[in-house]
Amino acid sequence: MPALIALKNLRLYTLIKPRKCSRVIGLASWLNSAAYSSDSNTSSPNNSVHGPSNTAKIPLAPIKEIAPIRNGALVPREKIPCKLIKKEILSHDVRLFRFALPSEDQVLGLPVGKHIFLCATVNDKLCMRAYTPTSSVDVVGHFDLVIKVYFKGVHPKVPNGGQMTQYLDSLSLGSVIDVKGPLGHVEYAGRGKLLVHDKPKFAKKLTMLAGGTGITPIYQVIQAVLKDPEDKTEMYVVYASRTEDDILLREELDSWAKEHERLKVWHVIQKSTKEGWQYSTGIVTESILREHVPEGSDDTLALACGPPPMIQFAVKPNLEKMNYDIKNSLIVF
């Protein structure tokens, strides 16, 4: 009887004092000890009651477990050390890097659409570069980065290669790198809601234009939308890459597009060297956009991330021809 009375009191207390979580947990813990015999070996993780063990004296209906609150690892304006625990070669110049967070029960704490800085000393100088993780924001204990490595002597525009990407490629498992964030001015808050420079925006349809590695923040938004069955936002992706082999995350994007009607994906490559290419070749043009993304409207926003020339000469002028308000409806990461 004392345990049953305590159960009623606990329910009443949670109605009257919903914010006093610690006291509720304390009562639940006391109730647990009252309901089980002193020699019971049954544990109650997170101070929840899971029901009687074989030695329980009084059968109780289970109390709903209080969900654990995950603390975010990122602290604004501070660096956190993260250890490299996995490095996978995805192609000749693309790598997946997995970094462990300082605590295995943490999430990264990065809002959808924002970025992190990787900080390292390269050639005796501090080097910082921004990246967007490809792992979901609710993943616990680690985060993933899919990064294109710019090797020395390969790309004419970067003859010495990318300082940070080559440094990352040289790291061995167990190496530690500093991470800083969040940074960025775009956040997807779910179900069509965005914060852009802390100002709210809303869309039923998202035009998503990406070039090269600029797919990663857009990939994060897509992932967040598809994980929520109540998020009915329609997404129209046009993704430009140099060659078919340069398309990042293609398997995931194409698979999601087949599984979800609210996601459409169209690829554009500069030139095709393989037979059977079923998408566009060349640059992103007005005709490509008219065929694969919606016309500008009050309930449509455009998200874009890619090389500056693409944004300046392919994205802005062509969207403007499609009645997009470039100032208010185009959001560049």
Image (spheres, helix red, strand yellow):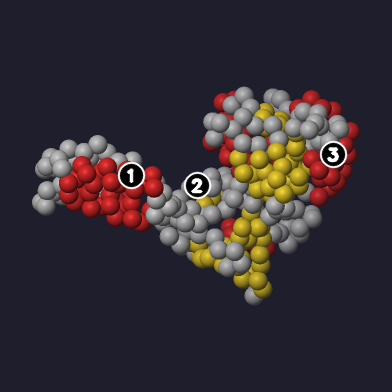
Task: Give the residue pinned by disc 1.
Answer: 12
Q: Name the residue beneath numbered marker 3.
A: 325
Locate residue 160, reporting x and y percent: 73, 62
Relative to 78, 277 lies left or right: right
Q: Along the horizontal axis of the image, is 31 left or right of 258?
A: left
- Asked which secondary structure carries label 2, the reply is loop
Pointer 2: residues within 10 angstroms few (<14), some, or many (20+)?
some
Q: Nearer the viewer, residue 230 or 302?
A: 230
Q: Residue at x 24, y 36 (%)?
A: 61
**Kind of residue at badge 3:** Asp
- Image quadrant in which the N terminus is located: top left
First-in-chain label (2 vs 1)? 1
Mark 2 against mark 1, which lies toward the viewer? Answer: 1
Q: Between label 3 and label 2, give the one nearer the viewer.
A: 3
Q: Secondary structure at mark 1?
A: helix
User: The residue tagged with tag 3: helix, strand or loop?
Assistant: loop
Tell me the residue that label 2 is attached to: 138
Q: Residue at x 86, y 33 (%)?
A: 323
Q: Residue at x 56, y 31 (%)?
A: 230
Q: Is residue 49 visible?
A: no
Using the image, determine if residue 172 lies above or below residue 242.
Answer: below
Separation of residues labelled 1 and 3 (CA atoms): 54 Å
